[in-house]
Image (tube, rainbow, N blue to C red):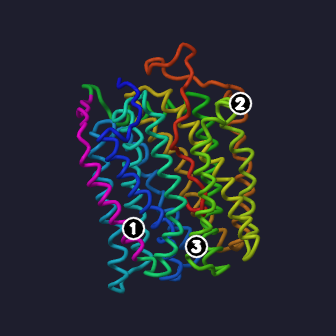
Amino acid sequence: MRKPSPGLLRDHDFRQLFGADTISQLGTQVSFLALPLVAIRSLHAGNLAIGVLTACETLAFLLVGLPAGAWVDRMRRRSVLITGDVGRAVVLLSVPLAWWAGVLTMAQLFVVAVVAGVLTVFFDVAYQSYLPHLVGRDNLVEGNAKLEAVRGVSQVAGPPLAGVLIGWLTAPFAVFLDAASYLASALLVRRIRRLEQRPVPGPEAHLGREIREGLRFVLGNPMLRAIAACTGTSNLCSTIAGTMFIVLLARTLNLPAVVIGLFASVGALGGLVAAFTATAIARRLGQGPTIWISVAVTGPFAVLQAITQRGWLLVAAALGTGVWAFGAVVYNIVQVSFRQGLTPERLLGRMNASMRFLVWGTMPVGGLIGGVLGATIGVRPTVWVGAVLGALTFLPVYLSPLRGMRELPRDPGQGAGPDGAVGPPVPGGDRPVPVTGAP
């Protein structure tokens, strides 16, 4: 186990991962806003079609979410990261090429969303499982904190940049830049020198058995089960609202892309503040109480999205989204720290995949529900439905043993202290920060 270092950025391998994450996160934020605007403004897609596109973006977590964890645990994770980056670059590049040729259709956007989603599943599972090997468990807090800071900064700087690029160069060109960012990320990951040994499956290795083992680990623990229920229902509700919220901003209010980007940036500021304050909050409140309080207190602020109008109500909605994002990031930091500390090394990939299957698998369902409701009851009522239901998603963790546990347990084989407590919270997680409402 590596000794804690004064600064991981002095480490060559971590610098490559840090640089790759910085480029990729910024490019993703650009495409995050650009892809739905391609559908809305270039293809004039209806509400139901936007809902289907949202569902396609996360459908992969239902299709390959579970076997991905078992497969990743059998492969070198660095190779998975490179393949995921290159694959997403190629897939996204097809969008601006088809648009420039005049042959882009919603069917192609659906396929691009699904394929990119499958690659993202493998990338994310490998990414969360690779960091402990790369920096050592004693350095997880510093490593994840730096990566979370990158995520926060990109969520603040990315949307305004996307708005300028979309307004100046059109949405398809912004997608092209995201594809280029994935290629740059792959080149940096390839420069990592510290290679893993290729895992050797045991003589009795069986994919189905390994998948069941990961699910049993998550569902058999009442605290992990409560976290999965809270995060899954939160993602369901935020996707219902978010599917139509981007339509509300872009079509109902007819806001310019630059203004939509600034809205997202203001919301992301809450997540950035949380990245630097969550550890202190968890120490003051206790880790268990922080998990449910962060969701219960900030969740109701999402209702401000439903009353968004031009003028001061737009500012109020942006600030409310920032509060909501603050709670989401605090929640992620503490619960992912708990999961990483509790899970044995050999199960990390399957634990992450099982949790992603359970909590992100609700998002394609939410996208379809949002699209159907938007086509029947209207855009703004759909945002109301998702926001009001989302305010109740803290109940599973509130009613669990986590509610009063100031210190959470960890796997004794990972070098826990004498009290078995998890160390300071580790950033990064499974509850998507609701900046513009899209997953």
Q: Which quadrant of the figure contains the N terminus? A: top left
Which mark, residue 48?
3
Query: The residue tagged with tag 3: helix, strand or loop?
Result: helix
Q: Residue at x 45, y 80 (%)?
A: 170
Q: Tell which residue pokes out farthest to the top in this image.
A: 418
Mark 2 vs mark 1: which is more N-terminal? 1
Relative vertical location of residue 247 with respect to residue 143 in this rendering, above or below: below
Q: Which residue is mark 2?
A: 403
Relative vertical location of residue 393 with respect to residue 413 in this rendering, above or below: below
Mark 2 vs mark 3: which is more N-terminal? 3
Q: Position of residue 287 (x, y in %)?
A: 64, 31
Quadrant hosting residue 277: top right
Amino acid carrying label 1: it is Val
Query: The residue tagged with tag 2: helix, strand or loop?
Result: helix
16 displayed left or right of 408: left
246 displayed left or right of 301: left
Q: Are marks 2 and 3 in contact (CB under 8 Å)?
A: no
Relative vertical location of residue 415 with respect to residue 224 in this rendering, above or below: above
Q: Which residue is mark 1?
A: 111
Gap between marks 2 and 3, in whole Å?
A: 39 Å
Quadrant hosting residue 28: bottom left
Residue placed most toward the observer, 112 or 5? 5
Characterize the local packing of mark 1: few (<14), some (14-19) or many (20 or more) Cα atoms within 10 angstroms. some
Q: In the image, which residues are magenta?
A: 173-201
Q: Are marks 3 and 1 in contact (CB under 8 Å)?
A: no
